[in-house]
Amino acid sequence: MKPPPDFLYRLMTTNESEAIMFRQNIRIYNSCYSFTSMGAKIDKSVNKGPGPYVFRISGQVLHRIGSLLPVGGEPPAYSQLYVYDTASEILIRERTVGKEEGSPKLDQGIMLQLKDMLDEVNPLTQAFRMAQERIKEHNDVQLSIILLGSRNKKDKDNPETSRRKNVTMRGYYTYRIQQRISEGHIWQCGRRLFQQFLVYCCCAIESDRLWYIKNNQDLFRCDILNDICDAIEKGDLIGHVIRKRFYLPPSFTGSPKYMYQRYQDAMAICRWYGNPYLFLTFIANSRWPEIEAMLKYIPNQRPEDRLAIVARVFKLKLMQLLHCLKTECYFGTTIVDVYTIEFQKRGLPHAHILLWLKKEEVDLSTDYIDSIIHAEIPDKDRKPALYEAVSRFMVHGPCGEANRSCSCMVNDTCSKKYPKSFNKETTLDHNGCSIYRRRENKRTIKKEDNHMDNRSIVPYNPGLLLMFDAHINVEWCNTARAIKYLFKYIAKGPDKATLVIKDDATDEIKSYLDCRYLSASEVAWRKFEFDIQERNPSVMQLPVHLKG
């Protein structure tokens, strides 16, 4: 990769006030000089309130370039500004993009220097500037710009190109986002723009896969659904919709059929092994020493700027946790485990884990539950390390009357039903859910000027909490009524928008694209092809041969 221009490098890496302001508004500056307009819905609601920034979109992503010159008296925008009215180019760019993004006033000096830099080093900018000169010379001639790929011959002396001729789109982007000592790291300094780049790359990869599925329906055994007899049996009585249906196979990760099959696999395990005993939720900690150590290689970096590092460290921690639970038998001999990966609306990945233990080693009494699951504040003097961990990770809220704007509040009520009630001992309610021991012992934790007691503590295991220095919620779930809810919860799939489509034909691919949400943290995880779901032992789905 070529080194960046000196001006851009200074803006991206130094602590000058001008550079800091530029990085805070880097997406706005990038939009000012974009050649195309972005056709995507950016989910801004996810960034309301305190917390790190996360770039999140919903629906499809399109880029529109338009004509070289404005049509019908419309003001010039995007690529047209490289050709039309260049004297007022900077003012129009700031006015157009600033209005769309709701951005603060941009620095005119930075805008001018960015323009000069692009004119000097960007071949696309130079091509559009050349078109501007041609239009001035021949105003009555129709012109078009054709962008061609590189015509250079392959470098046969390069061992990398000779050893591997082709690379997948995912492999290329995954290679490029890595940090290497021998290469520049200007990409990794992009902050919010780098998050946007990650999401765009994932959209391109996913669109390519969906295009292949749409144009090869026969390979996924979808042809039988287009047969006239089968169509009539399914209620497709309108002739013009037959052979116009597009189905998304269960082999596509994240599709509704994929999540439904994972749910059925979990239920099959439950039918064979019975109910699971423990349900764990493990959330990444952006302040893990491994993450902070990697961020030191590039100055001025924060965890939300390097979500690929967060994803890789969380994967290692998750494997360590599963090794502790399964190989080291932390709660006893584990015979089955099922987990799924999800992503918080503010970015951090987390895992939902179900564990089946060997029945002979499990005591179903409430005393056994109290020995492995705590829902109380520890003694600060006797266990200072545990007290600090509980204070950082296992306190819910404050919510309710203390903070009605908390994200868990729905209709002025906490959706997680906090704060709980004080209980002298652990019991099970009529739904089979555990009501943990929360004694009124006067111990409190101060959080945002509120003194939180045992009623606001999320159930945890002291050993795991200290071992992994992260939020690990441990719940007892060995009851039939809780199982179906838990399995649906871990197999519900990613967030989707509510949408009503009135059409005679079924296009599951379009419905998936219209309803999906993609965040930078999820994209970072998927680029490395880390598992979204895992189960052990595996479940084999037997094919069913119908008569005829």
Image (cartoon, rainbow, N blue to C red):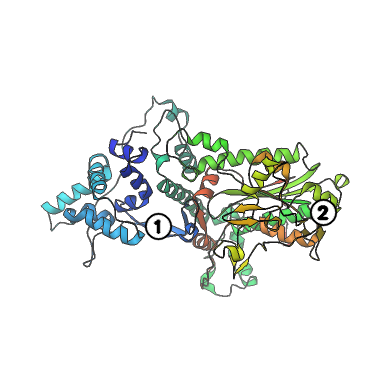
Residue 237 location in percent, x, y? 58, 75
Residue at the extreme bottom: 237
Q: Is residue 460 above or below residue 291?
A: below
Q: Is residue 488 left or right of residue 62?
A: right
User: Residue 139 appears in which quarter of the rendering?
Assistant: bottom left
Number of marks present in the image shown: 2
User: Which one is nearer the viewer's eye here, 181 or 155?
Assistant: 181
Q: Can see residue 528?
A: no
Q: Front-most of 511 and 14?
A: 14
Residue 85 vertical position relative to residue 154 in the rendered view, above or below: below
Please give the name of the residue rendered at 63% of the width and 44% of the height, measured from the top-left corner. 470
What amino acid does circle 1 point to? Leu
In this view of the protein, which residue sits in the foreground, 204 or 533? Answer: 533
Q: Quadrant of residue 80?
A: bottom left
Give the left or right position of residue 425, taking residue 177 as reference: right
Q: Earlier in the sequence, mark 1 or mark 2?
A: 1
Residue 157 position in % (x across, y down):
38, 24
Can residue 527 be seen here?
yes
Q: Secondary structure at mark 1?
A: strand
Under mark 2, the amino acid is: Gly
Q: Residues within 10 Å of mark 2 (few under 14, many from 20)?
A: some
Residue sitting at the far left: 137
Viewport quadrant of the N terminus: top left
User: Residue 527 at what x, y percent from top left?
Assistant: 52, 44
Task: Return the residue at label 1.
Answer: 62
Report which residue position mark 2 lands on: 274
Residue at the image point whose x is 77% and y is 60% from the top: 433
Residue 504 lies, with reference to residue 91, above or below; the image says below
